[in-house]
Image: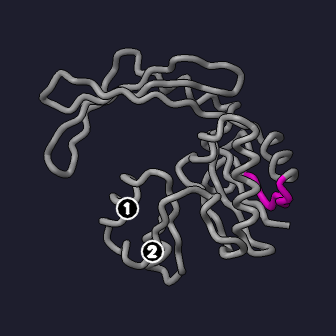
Amino acid sequence: MTTALARAGHRVTGIDPALASLQAAQRRPGAGGVRWRHGTAQDAPSAAFDLCLMTAHVSQIFVGDRDWHGVLRQVHRALVPGGRLAFDMRDPAARAWEAWDSAGEREVWSLPDGTEAETWCEVLDVSGHVVRFAEHTRFLPGQDVLTSTSALRFRSEAELRTSLHAASFEVEHISGGWRGERVGEGCGELVVVARRS
């Protein structure tokens, strides 16, 4: 998304705490038009951005309320007055995690270099609105399995509205999908646009 926005003529900064992700992004076509920063929202300059995008459900990695409120405060600081925050989160009412557990089924992916990878997911625990899961990958041919575990927080529309208001954002719109559907009538997403008060 960063390179597409840069190609469209926007001044874009991409911030990510994962150095490997930044290095991969910098190899993409059009990456030279993006200013890349290794860090988090805390490392963003103050009052520097018209828009902050948190993509690919990254909003869900902030499991604890303290962490979530902290990132909202940092984004608020980095936005100009009237600047907007946009992000996506899976709607907990859609219970997406029920489809994640592979139940032994595995997918095989062909990577650009010709390598094949077999992947599967295992839901480890659902506690309230926090889902812990393991993603398994085996590069073929081979026996070694790489496993990464993670936890995601599913916040309801009401929780999102409350937390955004507490961080001095005005919610402009929350839809239930990418075509502006009402919450509960889309694809199980919560697509949020809020404005810095």
Q: Main secondary structure of the magenta part?
A: strand
Q: Which residues are magenta?
A: 167-174
Q: Quadrant of the C terminus?
A: bottom right
The structure residue drawn at horizontal position 67% and vertical position 60%, both measured from the top left corner, is 86
Q: Position of residue 151 (x, y in %)?
A: 56, 30
197 above or below 102?
below
* Count of all numbered marks drawn on residues in the image: 2
In the rendered image, which residue does mark 1 sit on? 25
Q: How dense is the environment of label 1, judged by Cα within 10 Å: few (below 14), some, or many (20 and up)?
A: some
Which amino acid is tagged 1?
A: Ala
122 above or below 110?
above
In the image, is 139 to the left or to the right of 69? left
Residue toward you, 168 or 102: 168
* Residue 31 lies within the magenta run: no
* Residue 169 lies within the magenta run: yes
Name the secondary structure under disc 2: strand
Q: Position of residue 22 (x, y in %)?
A: 40, 59
Residue 66, quarter of the rendered image: top right
Q: Position of residue 43 (x, y in %)?
A: 60, 62
Which residue in the rendered view is the most extreme toward the bottom?
A: 9
Which amino acid is tagged 2?
A: Val
The structure residue drawn at horizontal position 31% and vertical position 71%, both measured from the top left corner, is 29
116 above or below 59?
above
Q: Are marks 1 and 2 in contact (CB under 8 Å)?
A: yes
* Label annotation for residue 34: 2
